[in-house]
Image (cartoon, helix red, strand yellow):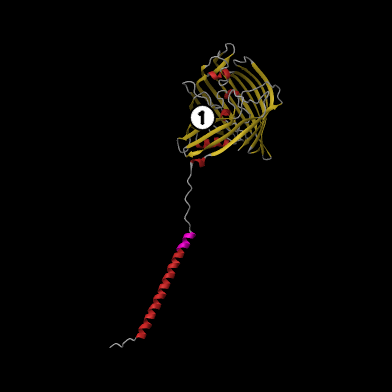
Amino acid sequence: MFSPINKREIRSYLQKISAITAFMLTATMAQAQETITSAQDSVIAKPKAPEATKSHWYDKISLRGYVQIRYNRLLETNPNFRTEYDKSVGDKGGFLIRRARLVFSGNVHDRVYIYIQPDLASTPSGSTSLHFAQLRDAYFDLSLDKKKEYRLRVGQSKIPYGFENMQSSQNRLTLDRNDALNSALPNERDLGVMFYWAPEHIRKRFSELANSRFKGSGDYGVFGLGVYNGQTANRPEANNNQHIVARLSYPFALKNGQIIEPGIQAYTGVYTVTSDQLSSSDIKGGNFTDRRVAASLVVYPQPFGFQAEYNVGEGPEFDAATRTIQTKSLHGGYAQAMYEMKIGGQTLIPFVKAQYYKGGKKAETDARFNRVYETEIGVEWQPLPNFELATQYTISDRTSRDGKSLDNRQNGRLLRLQAQFNF
């Protein structure tokens, strides 16, 4: 028989069970709290990685430019001596903003490169006002392969004819381009489609040469072939015949580090002398054969440099005897020597250039006849990357003939100054 359990023993037993249960519950809650705290600490110690910033096409566009300010009246011997390329030369000429360029460019896609350049200091032909905004370049390069060795250039751009024509005015030593080759492409540009090819390492070399030291022309390929309107930049097509241009040029690197670039180029087409180019209704315009071939040779300054080009061809030209515009032969070129000097961290590049041209200038009034003998002696000073000062003494003998002036010959000598700011 079991002995009976009294009430006191039962109460004591229940108290022990209650104490054990309370202890176990407290321990369980403490462990749970510790687990939650550890998880929170883990979240704080290892924050979630931020999402990658989304790239936009406009993030890939760069902006640069330059401004050129000139004064041409120092030491002038003939105030009646004037030029088409610089309206501030001669009587009543003063300070002039020759160029104010902005360049928007960039790779908006791995295969698409854009280049847009307006000029905010243009002077339209026949205008007495200055500093108009005008489009210079608006083109798009479409790469046909991953290495970008084969490209199509679509839009308004420089036509691959002549080294100095394609050389940027920001890099060129002389204040203005030579008449002989520039008369083929005033403003150097036109609207069309170009094909360029160059090996990857040569494209890199072209890029390295296109600076203020080497004065390169930029990357227009080893071989270029294109079709364009032929009426010059910012003018509509005036006939049903497009011009065709081709160019071959290669920058050879010698063992001593010197780089020599020979080149040959040619174009052919039909140019229309439009009614707005005529000085009177007695002179007739119309369509004229327009074709040329040119040879180039460039020795990049390291420290001595040399540059020469010559072209021959035929195009529209005013004939004083008959007071008509006819297709006539033309020829001319230039030679230039330069020497790069480093003095105390600054750069001096003295230069001398002589040019000759005889023939018509198709884009001028009545396809004006020109005969030019000109020598330029000067020095470019680069004290800062963002500032250059060019001083140039010009000795010129120019004869022109058009419907208003049958024999206008002007001789002149003058000292020309140009301050250039790069940004």
User: How many labels, in total?
Assistant: 1
Q: Residue 414's spot in the image, x, y percent?
A: 69, 25
Q: Which SS class for mark 1?
A: strand
Determine whether 159 is above or below 402 in the image: below
Residue 409 seen in this snapshot? yes
Q: Residue 367's spot in the image, x, y percent?
A: 57, 18
Which residue does the image show at 44% across and 70% down from the upper left? 30
Determine whether 53 is above or below 393 in the image: below
Q: Name the residue under label 1.
A: 156
Which residue is farthest front? Answer: 7
Q: Residue 352's spot in the image, x, y percent?
A: 66, 28
In the foreground, 86 or 109: 86
Q: Using a 10 Å C-alpha cutoff, classify the residue at mark 1 as few (fewer than 14 neighbours), some (14 to 19) or many (20 or more).
A: many
Which residue does the image show at 57% across and 37% down from the upper left? 64
In the foreground, 235 or 175: 235
Say which quadrant the N terminus sits in.
bottom left
Rendering quarter of residue 379:
top right
Q: Main secondary structure of the magenta part?
A: helix
Determine whether 18 is above or below 405 in the image: below
In the foreground, 47 or 397: 47
Q: Residue 71's spot in the image, x, y percent?
A: 67, 29
- Answer whether residue 322 is magenta in the image: no
In the foreground, 78 or 249: 78
- Answer whether residue 41 is magenta in the image: yes
Q: Give the range drawn in magenta.
A: 39-45
Q: What residue type is labelled 1?
A: Gln
Give the left or right position of residue 419, taking residue 221 as reference: right
Say which quadrant the C terminus sits in.
top right
Rendering quarter of residue 33:
bottom left
Which residue is farthest left? Answer: 1
Residue 360 seen in this snapshot? no
